[in-house]
Image (spheres, rainbow, N blue to C red):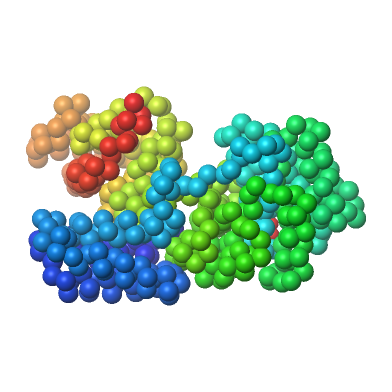
Amino acid sequence: MFDALSDRLGNTFDRLRGRGALREQDVRDAMREVRIALLEADVALPVARDFIEKVTEKAVGESVLKSVTPGQQVVKIVNDELVAMLGGSEGEDGHVPLTLEAKPPVVIMMVGLQGSGKTTSTAKLGKLIREKHGKKAMMASLDVNRPAAQEQLAVLGEQAQVDTLPIVEGQQPVEIAKRALESAKLRNVDVVLLDTAGRLHVDEALMAEMKAVASVATPTEVLLVVDSLTGQDAVNVAQSFSDEVPLTGVILTRMDGDARGGAALSMRAVTGKPIKFAGVGEKLDALEAFHPRRVAERILGMGDVVSLVEKAAETIKVEEAELLAKRMAKGQFDLNDLRMQLKQMQSMGGLGMLAGMMPGMKKAKAAMQASGMDDKVLVHMDAIMGSMTPKERANPALLNAKRKKRVAAGSGTQVQDVNKVLKMHQEMSRAMKQIKKMGGMKGLAAMLG
Ligand code: GDP
């Protein structure tokens, strides 16, 4: 996600940050690069232009240029504007949650073009509502155009352990919607998800059907599902739907395959609708709440620390995560911590999964790949650190040439491998100190107690 953009912005900002003083022209030059990076990420032109204007206006002010850390401040301004562009920072890092507290049954209407991932997203949401919100959900497919659409939802419903409305041959969408509501009332269902029919293109018949269904179902949420891989087309589709039906939010699917991110970046500015969720895979739990602040931080390479810690808390021992977070918050990070983290990494799906989430991991990963390291190497690294004494792990500076030789021999590796581990530790440790300085970890320790 956002890989190319992230790399380009990273290079631009490294240059800015690397200078003690900035002139207005430096900022303007950097903004030209940012603009190109945004357009290459397929951000809509007016959105990119507006973004650059806002950032430039704030960044060329005296207070920034004459400050002690001008580069850092410019990056902060870009970060804040990026958050605003992605949707804002209110609530939980800008995530706009589902409205589920209305009088039951709450109706969520899912709309979108064929193939956008609408049916899959319906089932993902059903599962999420059952598991995370603890509510009774029911799903109904109103898609009478596509053969087997209703059966597809029934199959997904079984996987998600969410009931689906029994299929009645020949019924039309509005009738199915009515029947779904009646059935939901009878069975004390909290949330009804209506998976409406898609089409290949936005057309009048589709819009008329959406409106007819909306008028009988009076949905609390109308969520548009769009495929992020279609870039600006996704934004245009959102615009067309938005003009016709009162959308309350967007689900952007296939974010797992979207390296550019243009749809995510321009959606809010063009349509005014929040991205509520991102689909990140075919499996039913591959749905993430969309948090603009965290996404912006991930794009700017500051690492998605909060997501990381949440993920860690789900998959690893909570006490370990707490300990680690506390130490990280204090800026302490020794080889004992690195070792613990590598273990956690393995249990969370290896390097690929974590690159870009963990501060400093991007660079560390690139360094590792450059030297031919991969997931298997995690095992070696663990052996290397296992051959050190706890004291050496707590204070890597102790590792002189003689000790390194011993460690290499003990782990069946070479001294240069030991050096690689130490280098990786240094990179990460530096990244964490940076985060600490920026105050980004404040909430983290508190969150974990
Ligand atoms: P619909 O026609 O809009 O209902 O689309 P479907 O829900 O049938 O999805 C079409 C295809 O996209 C299926 O193969 C899904 O597994 C796949 N899909 C849906 N969402 C995602 C996603 O977030 N990531 C990936 N990689 N595939 C997805």
Q: Position of residue 52 (x, y in %)?
A: 32, 70
Screen quadrant of the N terminus: bottom left
The reply to whether residue 256 is in sight is yes
Q: Is residue 339 left or right of residue 270?
A: left
Most extreme residue toward the right is 170
Residue at image location 78% in from the left, 36% down from the top: 185
Q: Position of residue 359 (x, y in %)?
A: 29, 47
Q: Is residue 348 above or below residue 282?
A: above
Q: For residue 127, what is the image quadrant?
A: top right
Q: Position of residue 411 (x, y in %)?
A: 26, 35
Residue at image location 62% in from the left, 44% down from the top: 125
Q: Is residue 11 above or below residue 342?
A: below
* Numbered disc total: 0
Residue at image location 16% in from the left, 71% down from the top: 24
Q: Is residue 320 left or right of residue 148?
A: left
Work out whether residue 141 or residue 268 is closer to the camera in this orientation and state it: 268
Q: Position of residue 391 (x, y in %)?
A: 16, 26
Q: Is residue 123 left or right of residue 182?
A: left
Q: For residue 260, what is the image quadrant?
A: bottom left
Screen quadrant of the C terminus: top left
Q: Is residue 272 above or below residue 355?
A: below
Residue at image location 35% in from the left, 29% down from the top: 448
Ligand 1, by image quadrant, is bottom right
The reply to whether residue 425 is in sight is no
